[in-house]
C-alpha cells in the first residue's frame, strides 16, 4: 500500500475545486494525472502531500491518515516538485539540491559524506553534474526544472509527486526526465499535459475534469477518442506508432502546409 485518497474534497473562494476524488497508486508504479487547465490537478497534488488540508475525505499513506503523520516523517517519505517552483535567488545549484537532504539530517548535524553522495548522485541523474556550483539565477527554465527534480531525488523519497515536470523542457529532456522517473522504481504521481507522453510513461492514468475523477485505468483503457473529445473537446484518432505504442493524432481542420 502507498498513497491513496478517499472521497477527498477541497475548495477555495466559495468554489469546489477537488470534488470527491478517490484514487490510489500501486507501489513503485507511475500514475499519470491528466485533465484540462483548471481541472484541479495541482490542487489534488497539494492535498496528497499535505500542503493543503482536505475539507473532507482522507489522504492515506500506507493506510494511515497523513493528517497524523509527523512533518519530518512525511518529508522523508514523500517529495514534491511543484509546477512553478521558485528558489532563493542567491543559491547555487548544489545548495538547492542539498535542501532535499534536510529531512534526513538531525538538528544541527554536520553535513555527512552520505548527504554529499546523495546530492552528487541526484545531479548526475538529471545530467547536471557540471553545473554543481553555478548560481541558480543563471540557469535556463529547463535546467531549473531539472535541479528541482534533483532536489526531490536527493530527498530519497519512496513517493514522488511531480506537477508537470516536463514544462519548459525540450523534447530530449522531457523524454529523459520521464524515463528517469520510470526507472527510479519509486511510487510516482505525475501531472502531465502531453497525452502521448502520459500514455508512453505511465502505468495507469487518472483523468480529472472540473475537479472530478472521470476515468482511471490503463492508458489504453482511458485514452479513448470518446474520452478525449468529452474532456478536452478535441477530436483524435489513435493508431499504432512506430515503436508499437499507441499514438494519439489530433484532427485539425486544415491540410498540411495550408495557410489561411
Ligand atoms: N487558492 C485558490 N483560491 C482560489 N481558487 C483556486 C485556488 N487554487 C486553485 N484555484 C482554482 O482552482 C481551479 C483548479 O486549479 P488547479 O488545481 O491549479 O488546476 P490544474 O492544475 O488542473 O490546472 C482553477 O480554476 C484555479 O483558479
Ligand atoms: Mg496545475
Image (spheres, rainbow, N blue to C red):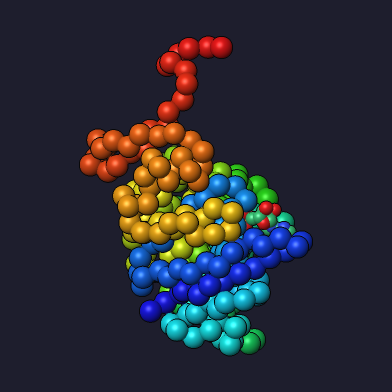
Residue nearest the viewer, comparing 53 with 14: 14
184 with respect to 10 (left or right): left
Residue nearest the viewer, comparing 163 with 33: 33
Q: Position of residue 222 (x, y in %)?
A: 37, 52
Picture residue at 48% right of the left edge, 80% below the top? 61
Picture residue at 44% right of the left edge, 43% below the top? 228
Relative to 133, residue 109 above or below:
below
245 with respect to 192 (left or right): left
Residue nearest the viewer, comparing 31 with 215: 215
Picture residue at 37% right of the left edge, 38% below the top? 248
Tell me if I can see residue 28 in this picture.
Answer: yes
Q: Position of residue 33 (x, y in %)?
A: 47, 56
Residue nearest the viewer, comparing 73 with 219: 219
**Tag count:** 0
90 with respect to 240 (left or right): right
Q: Position of residue 100 (x, y in %)?
A: 56, 70
Tell me if I can see residue 180 in this picture.
Answer: no
Q: Quadrant of the C terminus?
A: top right
Rendered image quadrant of residue 14: bottom right
Q: Position of residue 86 (x, y in %)?
A: 67, 57
Relative to 104, residue 161 above or below:
above
93 with respect to 250 (left or right): right
Picture residue at 45% right of the left edge, 68% below the top? 23
Q: Quadrant of the N terminus?
A: bottom left
Amino acid at each position: 500500500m502507498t498513497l491513496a485518497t478517499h472521497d477527498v474534497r477541497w475548495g477555495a473562494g466559495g468554489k469546489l475545486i477537488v470534488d470527491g476524488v478517490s484514487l490510489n497508486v500501486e507501489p513503485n508504479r507511475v500514475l499519470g494525472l491528466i485533465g484540462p487547465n483548471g481541472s484541479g490537478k495541482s490542487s489534488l497534488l497539494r492535498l496528497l502531500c499535505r500542503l493543503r488540508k482536505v475539507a473532507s475525505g482522507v489522504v492515506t499513506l500506507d493506510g494511515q491518515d497523513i493528517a497524523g503523520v509527523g512533518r519530518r516523517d512525511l518529508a522523508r517519505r514523500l517529495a514534491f516538485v511543484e509546477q512553478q517552483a521558485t528558489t532563493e535567488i542567491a543559491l547555487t545549484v548544489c545548495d538547492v539540491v542539498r535542501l532535499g537532504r534536510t529531512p534526513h539530517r538531525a538538528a544541527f548535524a554536520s553535513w555527512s559524506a552520505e548527504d554529499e553522495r546523495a546530492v552528487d548522485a541526484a545531479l548526475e541523474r538529471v545530467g547536471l553534474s557540471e553545473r554543481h556550483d553555478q548560481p541558480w539565477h543563471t540557469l535556463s527554465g529547463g535546467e531549473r526544472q531539472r535541479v528541482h527534480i534533483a532536489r526531490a531525488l536527493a530527498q530519497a523519497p519512496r513517493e514522488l509527486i511531480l506537477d508537470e515536470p516536463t514544462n519548459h523542457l525540450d523534447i530530449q529532456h522531457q523524454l529523459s526526465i520521464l524515463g528517469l522517473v520510470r526507472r527510479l522504481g519509486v511510487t510516482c504521481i505525475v501531472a502531465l499535459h502531453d497525452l502521448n507522453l502520459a500514455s508512453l510513461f505511465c502505468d495507469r492514468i487518472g483523468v480529472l475534469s472540473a475537479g472530478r475523477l472521470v476515468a482511471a485505468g490503463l492508458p489504453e483503457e482511458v485514452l479513448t477518442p470518446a474520452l478525449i473529445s468529452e474532456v478536452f473537446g478535441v477530436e483524435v484518432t489513435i493508431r499504432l506508432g512506430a515503436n508499437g505504442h499507441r499514438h494519439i493524432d489530433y484532427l485539425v481542420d486544415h491540410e498540411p502546409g495550408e495557410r489561411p
